[in-house]
Image (cartoon, rainbow, N blue to C red):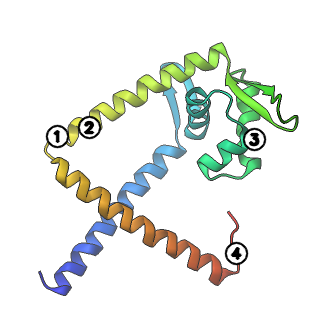
Amino acid sequence: MGVDKRYELFCELLKTMDEGVDAIDEYDSLLHDYHGTVLYQAESQIIKAVGDQPGITASELSREFNKTNSACSQLIRKLKKKEWIRQERNEKNNREYNLYLTDEGKVIYKKHEDFENACYERTYHMLDEISEEEMRTYIRIQNQLNRAFKLDVEESRQLSGNGGAD
C-alpha cells in the first residue's frame, strides 16, 4: 500500500473515531431512564463507582473520573440530596468522608448494572464477526492513538499557557 493510500486510510480511521466520540458525547449528555429512575450519565458513573468500591472518597472519585474535586463534590451533594448516597466520616482521617450507597442507591445501582450489561451483551454480539486477533489489533492501535492524543493535549496546554489545568 502506497504512502498516500495509507494516509487516506489513516484519515478514514480518525474520521470514524470522531463519529464514535461524537456518539459517546451525545450519549453522555442525555438523561438515562434505568427502569423508572432517570439519571445523567455522570450521576450513574458515581453511583456505579460507589457501588463497586464502597467507602471510596470524593478525592478518589475525582482522580478516577479525571474531574475536579469541586465537580465531584457537586455530584455527590446532588446524590446525597436524592438520598442515594451517604457519607461517613473516615475514622483515620477526620477531614475525609467515605461514600456508601443507601438502600435506594443500591436499587439504582442494580438497575444501572442490568442496563449496562444488556448494552454490553448487545454490542459484544454485534462484534461476533470480528476475530480475537482483530480485537487485539484494534486495542494496540487505540493505545498508540491515545498516546498521540495525550501528547497533543500536553502540547496544546503548553502552547496556551495552561500547563496542567484541567
In the rendered view, would you say 4 is above or below 77? below
Describe the element under mark 4 as helix, strand or loop.
loop
Report how far apart the C-alphas of labels 1 and 3 lie in the structure: 41 Å
Q: Quadrant of the C terminus?
A: bottom right
Q: Check whether the beta carbons of the residues at disc 1 and disc 2 lie within 8 A of each other.
A: yes
Residue at position x 58%, y 26% from top?
51
Q: Earlier in the sequence, mark 2 or mark 4?
A: 2
Up-down relation of residue 144 to residue 123 (above or below): below
User: What amino acid is found at the position of numbered circle 4 in the picture?
Assistant: Asn
Q: Is residue 7 visible?
A: yes
Amino acid residing under circle 1 = Asp
Q: Position of residue 152 (x, y in %)?
A: 51, 75
Q: CA distance from mark 1 to mark 2?
A: 7 Å
Q: Which mark is residue 74?
A: 3
Upstream in sequence: badge 4 or badge 3: 3
Classify 10 Å Cα crowding around label 2: few (below 14), some (14-19), many (20 and above).
Answer: few
**What amino acid does circle 3 point to?**
Gln
